[in-house]
Amino acid sequence: MKQLLLALTLLGAASFTRAVGATNESSVAPDNSALNQRDRSHKIPTADSQMRGSKLDIELTRKIRRELTKDASFSTYAKNVKVITHEGEVILRGPVRSESEENKIVAIAKQIAGETSVQNHLEVKTNQ
């Protein structure tokens, strides 16, 4: 009986290891790598510049981010857009799944930061 349990345990472990290995081999590369390259142009502030921001900038970003992650209707893309605040100006960047998501994200940011304090650089990516 002990030998049978040992054999079944080893067989299960081998199957699990093979399944995990297969999953890692076929992982999909992120689709926003080109956007990350573009963001390094230094023409528009990136998340790195947030480090030099004021406490108000950090608080605005935190409030917007909290609202984005609370909304269950948002795609993973929408929940992970870049929210950069510099001198009270909020910049939104990254891919979203629909125009509706884009509009909703911009509305949230404007509600928190003010109507004229939000730059929208979001991009709708529907066919992925």
Image: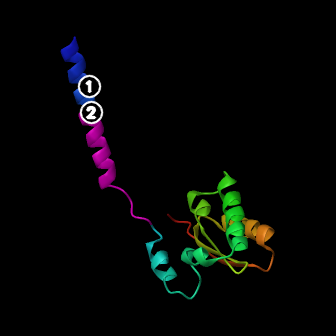
Give me the residue at 26% from left, 42% from top.
18
**Image location (x, y in percent) of residue 103:** 72, 68
Give me the residue at 70% from left, 71% from top.
55
The amino acid marked with disc number 2 is Ala
Question: Which quarter of the figure has residue 62?
Answer: bottom right
CA–CA distance in space, label 1 to label 2:
6 Å
Note whether 52 is above or below 108 in the view shown. Answer: below
Q: Which residue is mark 1?
A: 9
What count of labels does the image hold? Answer: 2
Q: Residue furthest bottom?
A: 43
> Are there few (<14), some (14-19), or many (20+) residues within 10 Å of tag 2?
few
Q: Secondary structure at mark 1?
A: helix
- Residue 13 is tagged as 2
Question: Which quarter of the figure has residue 116?
Answer: bottom right
**Does the residue at mark 1 contact the one at mark 2 (Cβ under 8 Å)?**
yes
The answer to whether residue 123 is visible is no
The answer to whether residue 38 is visible is yes
